[in-house]
Image (tube, helix red, strand yellow):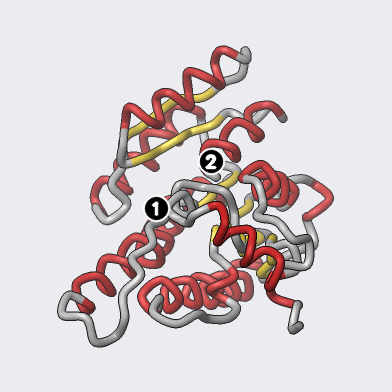
């Protein structure tokens, strides 16, 4: 989803500051964007490193002369039943990557966002932030936290004209779902998803982009499912 989002924003004229723990991967994304005659620059970033977040946000702001839109997209999925021996370790790591990093990047970017004409913060949450499945409480707890953070900051920063919204992807064809056998994905789609299929990363990217456009200037505090109808289907 990060790759699709970076490429889509660039296609629409954004100057993209792309980050990832894997520098080779994010560098490939930037190369693809530049090959399409669009503008992007890559930085390596471990979102669990508070000082690195400060440094990279500052570097990106200096490189482009400011920050208008911040997208928190980093993610991991550590499915762990509550009684597993390493549960606390996996819980702490999930919260660090999926929630604490959001607060740190927002805090680091705020001085620059406050100088922007139409500042936007977009957090990538999940339908797990709107509901729950068994054995996934580290991820689910973190994503509920992202939705709560989004709503709270929307009320806090609204007086400054900064919108804060969350995108909640459902079953999407990404590296996080690659491990699921195709037959199982098809069964799940028929049983649970109104549109009877998994989504594509580009479909999430378009909703993310829409929240940065002028048409979304009066939308804040929203948690928008992009899930093919997963959260509304009951039978």
Say which element carries label 2: loop
- Spatial CA span between label 2 and label 1: 11 Å
Q: What label does residue 108 carry, if any?
A: 1
Residue receiving disc 2: 67
User: Height in image: 13 above or below 54?
Assistant: above
Left/right of residue 182 with respect to residue 161 in the rendered view: left
Residue 235 shows up from this direction: yes
Say which element carries label 1: helix
Percent x, y for residue 36? 62, 15
Q: Residue at x 54, y 16 (%)?
A: 34
Q: Residue at x 69, y 60 (%)?
A: 226
User: Which quadrant of the figure contains the N terminus?
Assistant: top right
How crowded pointer 1 is (Cα within 10 Å; few <14, some 14-19, many 20+) is rated as some
Q: Residue at x 63, y 52 (%)?
A: 120
Q: Nearer the viewer, residue 226 or 146?
A: 226
Q: Nearer the viewer, residue 50 or 199?
A: 199
Left/right of residue 48 with respect to residue 156 in the rendered view: left
Percent x, y for residue 132? 52, 81
User: Height in image: 69 above or below 87?
Assistant: above
Percent x, y for residue 204? 66, 50
How crowded pointer 2 is (Cα within 10 Å; few <14, some 14-19, many 20+) is rated as many
Q: What label does residue 176 carry, if any?
A: none
Q: Nearer the viewer, residue 62 or 185?
A: 185
Residue 153 shows up from this direction: no
| Residue farthest along the right direction in this orientation | 215
Percent x, y for residue 169? 61, 60
| Residue farthest along the left direction in this orientation | 85
């Amino acid at each position: 989803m990060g790759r699709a989002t970076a490429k889509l924003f660039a296609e629409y004229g954004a100057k993209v500051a792309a980050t990832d723990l894997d520098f080779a991967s994010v560098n490939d994304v930037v190369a693809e964007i530049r090959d399409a005659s669009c503008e992007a620059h890559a930085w390596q970033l471990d979102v669990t490193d508070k000082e690195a977040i400060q440094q990279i946000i500052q570097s990106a702001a200096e490189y482009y002369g400011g920050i208008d839109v911040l997208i928190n997209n980093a993610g991991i999925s550590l499915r762990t039943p509550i009684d597993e021996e390493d549960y606390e370790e996996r819980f702490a790591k999930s919260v660090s990557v999926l929630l604490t990093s959001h607060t740190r990047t927002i805090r680091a970017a705020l001085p620059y966002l406050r100088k922007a004409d139409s500042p936007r913060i977009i957090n990538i949450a999940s339908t797990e932030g709107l509901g729950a499945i068994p054995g996934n409480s580290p991820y689910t707890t973190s994503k509920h936290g992202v939705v709560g953070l989004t709503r709270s900051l929307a009320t806090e920063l609204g007086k400054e004209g900064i919108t804060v919204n969350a995108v909640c992807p459902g079953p999407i064809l990404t590296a996080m779902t690659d491990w699921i056998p195709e037959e199982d994905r098809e069964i799940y789609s028929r049983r649970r998803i109104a549109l009877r299929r998994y989504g594509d990363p580009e479909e999430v990217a378009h909703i993310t982009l829409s929240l940065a456009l002028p048409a979304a200037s009066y939308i804040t505090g929203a948690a928008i499912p992009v899930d093919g109808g997963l959260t509304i289907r009951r039978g």
